[in-house]
C-alpha cells in the first residue's frame, strides 16, 4: 500500500474540522442531542468567606420543573480529590466569592436559572482579606512554583555586584489579575450508564479529566468515558477537570437522567482559575558597556485558602540573559479569593513584563539600543544549569525581526516622533517558552479501504492539532493526508498528555511517528507506540523556543489613547509543521499579549472580594479593530535533539514579551513609563 505523496508536514493545510465548525455541524460539550435531558445551574457564594448553614428553596420557584437543589447538606458524598476545587458541595466552608455552594437541577434551563436566582442562602459571614500587597503580613515563600521549579534560586553575590555596578535599574512592575475567556465556556453533559459515567466535556485533557472525575466518585478512570470532540478554546483553564464536570455528574446521578451544565461567562471569572496578579521588583546591574553583572527578580503573588498554586513568574529570568550574579524568587499569600491557575504561558507571560521592560529601562539608562543590549548579554549556555541550548537563535530573531520590522535608524530617545496629534514609538522585547514533551501513546491501524486510522486521546482546542497529526502520519506512511483518519478527543483512546505547556504537537506527534514507523517496519495491520521511556530519558534543560516581538504604537497627545499600529513576532521554534495553523497560534498569543498590555484587567473590589468587571462589558479583550497590522514569521530551525519532528511548542510564546514590546513602545512614544499594567490613557496623562 505504499503510495508516494508529497510531504504534508510544512504545508499550510486547512483545519480538517474547519467545514464542520463553520457550518455549525461540529458538536460542542452541551450540544449532543439526548432524550429527557435536564439542566443544572450553579448557585455561587455572594460572600468571600463564611459558613453556609442552610439553603432554603423558594416555593414560588417553578417547583414542578425543579428536580433537585443540591448543597452540602444533601449532596452525594465524594472522595477527597487531589484538587480541592473539585470537592464541590462537600463543606460548609466558603473560601471565596463565586464558589459553587448549591446546584439547581431542573427540566428546563429557564427553570433551573429561576430557582437558582431565588434560592436563599443562610451564611455566617466572616471578615475576609482579598487584597494582594507587597507588605502583606502573611506573605510566605513556597517550596516550589508550578510546575516543579524551586521558588528561589541564587548564583554569585548579587548585593556585591549591585554595590560595585556603575549602572543599575531598580523598578517595580505590576500585572493585574487576568481571566481566561475561551469562546466556549466550561461545559459538561453528564450521563450515567449502569455504574459508569459518560461526560461530554470541554477540556484540554480527556484522560486527565476521566481520572480526576473518576477519583471523586470512587471509580477508576476506565469507568469514566470523557468525550471531547471539539473544544472552543482553553488557554490552560481547561487543562484539568473543573468543578462543572463534577457538578454535572453529581446532578445526573441525583436526577437519574442526563444533565447539561454550561458555566455562564460571569461564573468563569471565579470558577475556572485566572492568572494571579503579580507585584514584581526587578533590579539589573550592568557595566557601562551594557554587560549585565546582576539580575534580581522577585514576585509577590496570590493563591487561595484551599489550594497552593504558585505562578512561576521569575523563572524566565533564570535563563534569558547571561549574568554572573542572579537571584530569583516567588512569594505568596493566601487570600479569600478563587484559586489562580494556568493561563497561557503561566509565569513567562507576567515575568517577561518585568524582565523585558527593565531591560528597556536599562538600555535607556545606558543610552544604548535595546536590541544591542540584549545581544551583549547572550549566554553561551543555559545560565543556571550550564547545559548547552539544543538550539537558541534568539539573536537571529532579534536581528531578522529588526530588519523586517524596520528598526534601523530608530532614535533611541523617547518622545521624538510626532505625526499630527499622535506621538509614535516603537518597542522590542524578547520571547521564550520551554520546549517540552510528555509521555503519550498512539495506535495506528490499516483499514480495509486502504486508509489508516490514527488514535490518540489528545484534544484539539481549535489550534489545528487534529490536522497536524494527520500530516505527521501521512508523511510517515507516505500517504496523502486524505487517506489518514485521526481519532482524538476521547479518553478511551490511547493515553495522551495534556494539550498544555505548548507540548501537545511534540508529545502526540512523537507517539504517532513511533506507531507509524512500527506499522511500516512490522508489516502488520496495527501498531501501538508508547513514548514514556523515551521521554523520561530526555534531558529537560537547554530546550526552549525563542522569539522577538516588535511593536509600533501611536499615542494621542491630548487623550492618551494608545493605538497599536504594528505588532510583529519573529520566532525560532523548531520545525514549523503547518505554517497556517502556526501563524494563527503565534498571532493568537500576540493578541492576548496586546490584551495584557492595554485592555485586560480583573478589577478587584476588596470590600466585596469580587472582580467587579466579570463579563465582556467590563473586561475588555482585544478585537480586530484594536490592531492595524499584526503578523508573525519564523526562522528555519532544525533541532534534532527534541523529538522526531524537530518541532518546538508554539502555543504560548506569542504572549511572552509581546506585552513588554507594547509597553516599551508606549514609553518610546511618550517618555512615560507605565509600570502597572494595563496601560490606560489615565496613566499617560
Ligand atoms: Mo497552557 S496555560 O499550558 O494550557
Image (cartoon, rainbow, N blue to C red):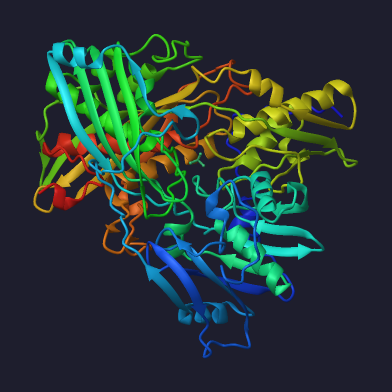
- To which quarter of the image does residue 330 belong? top left
> Residue at point 75% right, 34% down?
442
For the residue pair 390 and 196, the one nearer the viewer reads as 196
Q: Is residue 117 above or below residue 305?
A: below
Q: Is residue 424 above or below residue 4?
A: below
Horizontal arrangement in the rendering, residue 435 relative to residue 361 (left or right) = right
Task: Answer whether residue 480 is visible to the viewer in this image.
Answer: yes
Q: Is residue 164 above or below residue 685?
A: above
Q: Position of residue 98 (x, y in %)?
A: 43, 63
Q: Position of residue 437 (x, y in %)?
A: 59, 28
Q: Position of residue 82 (x, y in %)?
A: 59, 46
Horizontal arrangement in the rendering, residue 405 relative to residue 468 (left or right) = left
Horizontal arrangement in the rendering, residue 30 relative to residue 666 (left or right) = right
Task: Answer whether residue 397 is visible to the viewer in this image.
Answer: no
For the residue pair 402 and 609, the one nearer the viewer reads as 609
Residue furthest to the bottom in view is: 60
Q: Position of residue 51 (x, y in %)?
A: 44, 66
> Residue at point 17% right, 24% down?
169
For the residue pair 305 and 28, the one nearer the viewer reads as 305
> Residue at point 77% right, 52% down?
223
Q: Is residue 371 above or below residue 288?
A: below
Total numbered labels placed on residues in the image: 0
> Residue at point 36% right, 42% down?
593
Quadrant of the drawing holding the N terminus:
top right
Amino acid at each position: 500500500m505504499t503510495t508516494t505523496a508529497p510531504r504534508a508536514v510544512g504545508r499550510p493545510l486547512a483545519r480538517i474540522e474547519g467545514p464542520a465548525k463553520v457550518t455549525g455541524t461540529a458538536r460542542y460539550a452541551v450540544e449532543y442531542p439526548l432524550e429527557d435531558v435536564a439542566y443544572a445551574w450553579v448557585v455561587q457564594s455572594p460572600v468571600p468567606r463564611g459558613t453556609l448553614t442552610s439553603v432554603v428553596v423558594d416555593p414560588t420557584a417553578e417547583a414542578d420543573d425543579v428536580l433537585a437543589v443540591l448543597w452540602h447538606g444533601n449532596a452525594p458524598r465524594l472522595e477527597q480529590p487531589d484538587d480541592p476545587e473539585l470537592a464541590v458541595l462537600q463543606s460548609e466552608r466558603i473560601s471565596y466569592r463565586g464558589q459553587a455552594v448549591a446546584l439547581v437541577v431542573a427540566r428546563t434551563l429557564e427553570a433551573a436559572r429561576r430557582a437558582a436566582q431565588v434560592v436563599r442562602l443562610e451564611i455566617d459571614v466572616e471578615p475576609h482579606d482579598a487584597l494582594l500587597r507587597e507588605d502583606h503580613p502573611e506573605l510566605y515563600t513556597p517550596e516550589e512554583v508550578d510546575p516543579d521549579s524551586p521558588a528561589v534560586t541564587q548564583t554569585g553575590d548579587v548585593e556585591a555586584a549591585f554595590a560595585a555596578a556603575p549602572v543599575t535599574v531598580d523598578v517595580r512592575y505590576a500585572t493585574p489579575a487576568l481571566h481566561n475567556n475561551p469562546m466556549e465556556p466550561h461545559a459538561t453533559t453528564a450521563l450515567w450508564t449502569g455504574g459508569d459515567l459518560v461526560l461530554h466535556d470541554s477540556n484540554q485533557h480527556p484522560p486527565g479529566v476521566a481520572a480526576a472525575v473518576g477519583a471523586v466518585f470512587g471509580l477508576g478512570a476506565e469507568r469514566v468515558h470523557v468525550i471531547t470532540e471539539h473544544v472552543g478554546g482553553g488557554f490552560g483553564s481547561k487543562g484539568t477537570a473543573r468543578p462543572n464536570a463534577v457538578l454535572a455528574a453529581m446532578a445526573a446521578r441525583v436526577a437519574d437522567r442526563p444533565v447539561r451544565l454550561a458555566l455562564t461567562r460571569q461564573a468563569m471569572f471565579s470558577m475556572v482559575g485566572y492568572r494571579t496578579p503579580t507585584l514584581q521588583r526587578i533590579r539589573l546591574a550592568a557595566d557601562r558597556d551594557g554587560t549585565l553583572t546582576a539580575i534580581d527578580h522577585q514576585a509577590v503573588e496570590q493563591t487561595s485558602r484551599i489550594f497552593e498554586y504558585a505562578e512561576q513568574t521569575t523563572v524566565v529570568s533564570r535563563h534569558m540573559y547571561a549574568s554572573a550574579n542572579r537571584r530569583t524568587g516567588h512569594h505568596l499569600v493566601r487570600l479569600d479569593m478563587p484559586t489562580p491557575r494556568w493561563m497561557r504561558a503561566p509565569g513567562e507571560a507576567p515575568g517577561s513584563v518585568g524582565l523585558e521592560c527593565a531591560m528597556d529601562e536599562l538600555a535607556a539608562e545606558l543610552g544604548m539600543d535595546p536590541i544591542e543590549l540584549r545581544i551583549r548579554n547572550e549566554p553561551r549556555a543555559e545560565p543556571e544549569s550550564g547545559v548547552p541550548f539544543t538550539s537558541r537563535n534568539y539573536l537571529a530573531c532579534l536581528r531578522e525581526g529588526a530588519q523586517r520590522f524596520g528598526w534601523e535608524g530608530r532614535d533611541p530617545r523617547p518622545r521624538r516622533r510626532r505625526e499630527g496629534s499622535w506621538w509614535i514609538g516603537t518597542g522590542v522585547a524578547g520571547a521564550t517558552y520551554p520546549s517540552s514533551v510528555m509521555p503519550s501513546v498512539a495506535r495506528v491501524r490499516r483499514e480495509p479501504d486502504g486508509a489508516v486510522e490514527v488514535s490518540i486521546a489528545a484534544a484539539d482546542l481549535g489550534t489545528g492539532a487534529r490536522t497536524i497529526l494527520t500530516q505527521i502520519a501521512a508523511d510517515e506512511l507516505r500517504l496523502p493526508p486524505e487517506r489518514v483518519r485521526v481519532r482524538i478527543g476521547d479518553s478511551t483512546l490511547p493515553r495522551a498528555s495534556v494539550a498544555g505547556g505548548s507540548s501537545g504537537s511534540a508529545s502526540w506527534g512523537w507517539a504517532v511517528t513511533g506507531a507509524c514507523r512500527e506499522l511500516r517496519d512490522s508489516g502488520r495491520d496495527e501498531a501501538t507506540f508508547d513514548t514514556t521511556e523515551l521521554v523520561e530519558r530526555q534531558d529537560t534543560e537547554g530546550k526552549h523556543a525563542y522569539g522577538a516581538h516588535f511593536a509600533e504604537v501611536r499615542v494621542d497627545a491630548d487623550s492618551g489613547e494608545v493605538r497599536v499600529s504594528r505588532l510583529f513576532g519573529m520566532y525560532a521554534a523548531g520545525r514549523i509543521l503547518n505554517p497556517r495553523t502556526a501563524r494563527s497560534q503565534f498571532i493568537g498569543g500576540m493578541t492576548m499579549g496586546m490584551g495584557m498590555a492595554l485592555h485586560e484587567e480583573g478589577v478587584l473590589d476588596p470590600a466585596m472580594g469580587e472582580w467587579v468587571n466579570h463579563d465582556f462589558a467590563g473586561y475588555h479583550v482585544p478585537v480586530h479593530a484594536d490592531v492595524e497590522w499584526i503578523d508573525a514569521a519564523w526562522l528555519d530551525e532544525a533541532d534534532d535533539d527534541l523529538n522526531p519532528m524537530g518541532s518546538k511548542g508554539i502555543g504560548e510564546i506569542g504572549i511572552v514579551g509581546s506585552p513588554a514590546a507594547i509597553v516599551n513602545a508606549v514609553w518610546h512614544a511618550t517618555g512615560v513609563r507605565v509600570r502597572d499594567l494595563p496601560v490606560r490613557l489615565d496613566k499617560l496623562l
